Image (cartoon, rainbow, N blue to C red):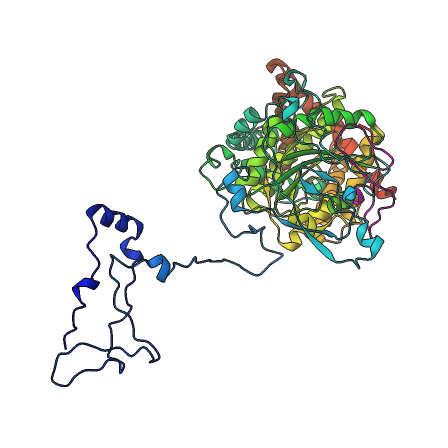
Amino acid sequence: MALQRAPSDRVPPPLSPDAQRTFQNQYPPQQQYRPPQPMRQNSNFSQSSGNSGPQTFNPHSFPPPRPYAPNPQTYVPQQQYPQQQVYTSNYVPYNPRAPPQNAYNVPYQQNQYDPNYQQQFPPQTQYVQAQRPPSHKSQEHGRPWLDSNSDSSDGGSRPLQVVQQPLVQEVISPTSSQNRRPSFPSLKRGTSRKPNVPNRSYAFDAPDDATKRTNKGNTRAVMTMLADMWLIHMIVIFGLVYVQTFMLWNYDDELLWNWTCYYKLGWLLPTPYTIICLFGLIMPYRTPRFLYHDKLAKRRCDNLYILTVTRGNNREAVYRSWNAHRHLERIHPSVRVHVLTDEPYFFENINCYTCPKTFATAKSKYKARALEWYRQTMAYTEFDWILHLDEESVIDDESVRRVLEYIWYETDMHMGQGPILYNQYRYWKNWIFTVADALRVGDDLSRFHLQLTYIKRPIWGCHGSFLLVNGLVENAVTWDLGSLTEDYEFAMAAWKYGFKVGKIPAFIREQSPQGVLDFMKQRRRWFVGIWRLKHPLPKIWAGFWTFGTLCLFTTIATIPLGFFYQYGVPRWFGLLKDLTSSTFLYLYVLGIFVQDLDKGKHPLLVVVHLPLTLIVSFIAVLLETASVLYGIIFPPKDFDVIKK
């Protein structure tokens, strides 16, 4: 059967070459309609028997026949068969143990301050109580403040209202007073339902003078040196052990045990702790030198809150911290510098957040209570990060940049921590306290380095200062904790939820206590607070602290007994003793060496400090032992605040 050709007067005129090229550009071949299967016979077509007459079509039949392939000169695919936009989603059910997910299920490839990025990611939806007067919507940096008392005042009976607020402000230059961050509706203190929060950022009120900054250090140089010192640690420690075991002391090779080994067992009690530190020292130091680069996809970070927590009674320390950190908001638009105090201590003209006396939690007190109020006030999201600092802590510009890089590139981490130095104020003013805190620096560079770089779980807890936490973690764990060491308990709870912690390749700087009683109270609170935690691991580490006390008593008892009972010592016993003592003393020396380099001390003075550290370390060990005994005999009933 042949189809009859349509009359010539119904055939459209051919297109010109230019029109054909326009048609091909506007309607590519893949967009033209193609029938998915060959055309089939239909009863609506009538055939004349024996003749090849034309087909006739019945328009009243159903379903209609499949049309012919369209003529490219008359077919317009957008009008007849419009192309549909396809939406895909990678939605997965919420899992509280899973790492923070991107709310839009897309890779982190662009900076959130790019206008194209802002169009791609709309503002987050936040929920606030409806029917609130406009004057109560205090804002800072474009984010609404949620009234922490609203749930208790109205019982949550009012419905929730969806309010769209942009989380990212326009990037502006702070050099001119006209280009500062925009101020928001003002809050007169004492007349609003939110009197304890600032209505704007005061970081740009004063001009930035780089010559007057106090947050200085050699972070880049010291971190570069530590990245390659693991081999030096191995050579020095094992060299000292070899000299003591095989050259200095006369141990007996044929003896395996004698009765003097019973009371000398106290020497070996700290051996598990020193072996852990030894492994941390000889493991390679992870550095971002070859890991971070601009081609990597960045994790989204809306806000980085640099939060200094203080009671507020030390006015000098509060302003000293604020003056050292306020210019950090110029480094990146996401940086926010805040100071958290307790009522009635409020400081004007700084970003001071004061926890009211009326705020109460189920278990937390003091610092943990203030942190819980701050968490509820700020309404964290998974794109917020909080860097916790103590009142005497100071972080330099290079360390802040490294914290931002850690947030952007360490996408599988929920928490972070770095080493703490104690050379910011009054360094070497008191030799005993300077050397005593040098052990804490060595502990950060060894034991905590092993935990944060390789284990990535807070099995030994975390410090309360230089603790970087994601908002999702704080919302899951909260600070409603009833311990003297809230930082350790928070780390244990975060580990229970499955969150991971990593190492930040940066430093913060603090100062040592300046009095014997303050030093002993600080160590007593740590020891008793860790011992009282319900988890078994903290009790083990507190036990190692007690073993150090027994080791000191063993050393003191061995001196007089050695004159009356001159028995040999097995070489294997002496080897373990020398390994413990060499590693322990090396932690003191390493802590002083790193702090002197960071402080920029003269090389000759650095060399003089090393043997001086070995001598003063014995006095520091006596103080540590006295602090443990002080905690066992007179445990603290409350939180001790020491003056620095």
Q: Residue furthest bottom?
A: 49
Image x and y of residue 404, in percent: 58, 36
In the picture, measured across the screen, residue 337 lies left or right of residue 168, that is right
Pick the front one: 195 or 557: 195
In the picture, measured across the screen, residue 387 lies left or right of residue 409, that is right
Instruction: Work out whether 189 lies above or below 536.
Output: above
Pick the front one: 252 or 170: 170
Instruction: Work out whether 47 lies above or below 420.
Output: below
Q: Residue furthest front?
A: 9
Image x and y of residue 380, in percent: 68, 46
Image x and y of residue 95, in percent: 60, 58
Position of the C terminus by quadrant: top right
Q: Residue furthest left?
A: 50
In the picture, measured across the screen, residue 103 lies left or right of residue 317, that is left
Which residue is located at x 70 percent, y 45 percent? 541
Type of secondary structure dominating the magenta stretch: loop
Position of the N terminus by quadrant: bottom left
Which residue is located at x 32 percent, y 77 percent? 59
Residue 323 visible from this viewpoint: yes
Which residue is located at x 74 percent, y 32 percent? 351
Please give the range of residues in magenta. 343-371
Image x and y of residue 26, in percent: 31, 50
314 inside magenta stretch: no
